[in-house]
Image (cartoon, grey):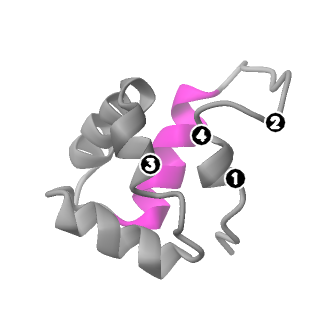
């Protein structure tokens, strides 16, 4: 499990609509982790959140649609 794997995932999913579609039915962090493992990634949700927080410092959310909508509907806590 690593931040490097999470970083590779975020880069791939940002540009890969087909990859994002694999997460449309994901409803929980456990299901999310199962899918990423099947895709060859290895990181925890805590590592993903740490990386996302680091990469989004100073970013203002202007809308609640787009590439990350599938990620926002999961109850991460």
Q: Please state the horizontal and vertical placement of residue 47, each as a whole percent of the image.
A: 41, 56
Q: CA distance from mark 1 to mark 2?
A: 8 Å
The disc, 3 or 2, on the residue closer to the chain's N-terminal end is 3
Q: Which residue is mark 1?
A: 72
Q: CA distance from mark 1 to mark 4?
A: 14 Å
Q: Which residue is mark 2?
A: 64
The disc, 1 or 2, on the residue closer to the chain's N-terminal end is 2
The disc, 2 or 4, on the residue closer to the chain's N-terminal end is 4
49 in the magenta segment: yes
Find the residue positioned furthest to the right.
62
Compared to residue 17, the image places residue 9 above or below, namely: below
Q: Which residue is mark 4?
A: 53
Q: Residue at x 59, y 74 (%)?
A: 27
The disc, 1 or 4, on the residue closer to the chain's N-terminal end is 4
Q: Please state the horizontal and vertical placement of residue 24, each as a whole percent of the image.
A: 53, 58
Residue situated in front as seen by the camera: 15 or 21: 21
Q: Residue at x 44, y 68 (%)?
A: 32
Labels 1 & 2 near each other (Cβ < 8 A) = yes
Compared to residue 15, the image places residue 67 above or below, namely: below
Residue 21 is labelled as 3
- Identify the image quadrant of residue 22: bottom left
The quadrant of the rendering that contains the C terminus is bottom right
Q: Residues within 10 Å of mark 3 (few under 14, many from 20)?
A: few
Q: Residue at x 52, y 74 (%)?
A: 29
- Between circles 3 and 2, the one closer to the viewer is 3
Q: CA distance from mark 3 to mark 2?
A: 17 Å
Instruction: Label 1: state its secondary structure.
Output: helix
Q: Residue at x 19, y 57 (%)?
A: 39
- Between circles 1 and 4, the one closer to the viewer is 1
The disc, 4 or 3, on the residue closer to the chain's N-terminal end is 3
Residue situated in front as seen by the camera: 64 or 47: 64
């Amino acid at each position: 499990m690593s931040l490097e794997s999470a970083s590779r995932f975020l880069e791939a999913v940002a540009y890969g609509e087909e990859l994002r579609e694999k997460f449309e039915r994901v409803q929980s962090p456990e299901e999310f982790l199962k899918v990423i493992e099947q895709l060859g990634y290895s990181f925890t949700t805590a590592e993903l959140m740490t990386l996302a927080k680091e990469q989004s410092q100073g970013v203002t959310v202007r809308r609640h649609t787009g590439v990350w909508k599938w990620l926002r509907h999961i109850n991460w806590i």
